[in-house]
Amino acid sequence: MTTTSTAFLAIRRKNLVQHKQWMGRSYLVTFAFVSFRLASDLMKAGHILPDHERSAVLAWGCWALPHRR
């Protein structure tokens, strides 16, 4: 909610550059939760890594990997 609200305020202030940056962050935050759940379910079904290791790897990967440009 915070990232989307900040993007909304930026566009209301006609700050297109800041709006674009915050919308990208909003997408990243939202999609990180979706990709974490999907990858976790797939890895669990494939018996890949124990639960605690899988969660650590995915928590890092879902936030760090989308930042690459």
Image (cartoon, grey):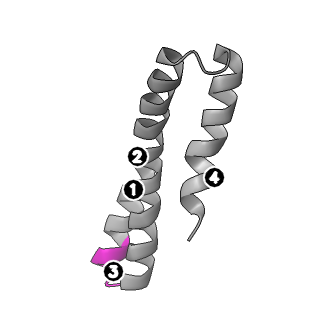
**Disc 1 crowd, CA 10 A, few/some/many (<14, 14-19, 20+):** few
Tell me the residue that label 1 is attached to. Answer: 27
Q: Which amino acid does label 3 sit on?
A: Arg
Q: In which quarter of the image is residue 51?
A: top right
The numbered mark, 3 or 1, whose residue comes first in the sequence reads 3
- The CA distance from mark 4 to mark 3 is 30 Å
Residue 69 lies left or right of residue 57; in this view the side is: left
The numbered mark, 2 or 3, whose residue comes first in the sequence reads 3
Magenta residues, start to end: 10-15
Residue 21 lies, with reference to residue 42, above or below; the image says below
Residue 9 lies left or right of residue 58; in this view the side is: left
**Disc 4 crowd, CA 10 A, few/some/many (<14, 14-19, 20+):** few
Residue under the image location 71 percent in, 23 percent down: 53
Residue under the image location 46 percent in, 25 percent down: 42
Q: Which of 61 and 18 is in front in this view?
A: 61
- The CA distance from mark 1 to mark 2 is 5 Å
The numbered mark, 1 or 4, whose residue comes first in the sequence reads 1
Query: Residue 43 in magenta?
Result: no
Q: Do the residues labelled 1 and 2 touch (CB within 8 Å)?
A: yes
Tell me the residue that label 4 is attached to. Answer: 64
Q: Are marks 3 and 1 in contact (CB under 8 Å)?
A: no
